[in-house]
Image (cartoon, rainbow, N blue to C red):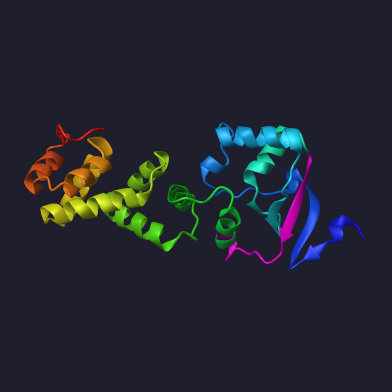
Amino acid sequence: MNITDIIVNNIEYDVLEISSIKHNMKNPSIRTDRNNNSFKSLKNNIKTNGLISPIVVDRNYNLIDGHRRLNALKDLGHKLIPSNINRTVDPKNYGKIFKAANHDTMKVTATQETEMYLNGATNISSKVLSCINALEKIGGRAVIRRIASERKAPSTFTSGVRMYCKHVNDYTLKAQKDVLYWMFNVDTCYKLKACIHSFVDAELIRDCVENRKKLVFDWFKK
């Protein structure tokens, strides 16, 4: 029996032409960045030991798992790549399978999900999506793009907004916009939270936020 004839649980093993495989355009950039140190390490490992784990594609050769392995083999001049073809994957469950496949390798973080959202992905975890929606209501899509570009998690900012509004007892849109701007451009979300947890006077914090001043205390160490 030819090895390419092996099919188990709707997953078929085959050796595919690299040129036939379609990249996931919604994939976070950190997973395709060839300058990332982890990618360089992976490429060196494959150069030394060969490809140990096949990539995973769907029936139409859309890549599910193995973006970095595929790029490594491309860079090393290979034309073929060992692949597992999962025939149960379709557009409706692709996002779910993608995250499941990467759970034990390079875990999909909230930061990566934010970039996936900006790239048009719809299968975003409810917690991350809730934070994204809340922030978009405050500052629009530009806020989400900035969070993604700085590789931060949306929850970092939604929790900061929530804590500030509760501390100063002001839940207006203006208060939310003010503190979001402050966390991005004046001082840090971490310092804001530390001051609130340390019971710094609400009016003092409000003054710093509204007048775009840093929070400066002798006890606080950056």
Residue 76 placement, left or right of 100: right
Quarter in which the C terminus is drawn? top left
Residue drawn at x 19%, y 49% is: 197
Return the x and y of residue 156 as percentages of the image width and height.
32, 48
Return the x and y of residue 188 as percentages of the image width and height.
26, 39
Report which quarter residue 209 is drawn in. top left
Q: Residue furthest right?
A: 1
State the residue in front, 141 or 16: 16
Return the x and y of residue 74 as percentages of the image width and height.
71, 37
Residue drawn at x 58%, y 53% is: 104
- Residue 39 visible? The answer is yes
Residue drawn at x 90%, y 57% is: 2
Q: How many marks?
A: 0
Question: Which residues fall within the magenta stretch?
Answer: 79-95
Is residue 91 one of those drawn in magenta? yes
Q: Residue furthest front?
A: 219
Q: From what the image shows, is residue 120 above or below residue 93?
A: above
Quarter in which the N terminus is drawn? bottom right
Is residue 96 one of those drawn in magenta? no
Residue drawn at x 56%, y 32% is: 37
Return the x and y of residue 191 as percentages of the image width and height.
23, 40
Q: From what the image shows, is residue 120 above or below residue 8?
A: above
- Residue 172 visible? The answer is no
Q: From what the image shows, is residue 62 above or below residue 50?
A: below
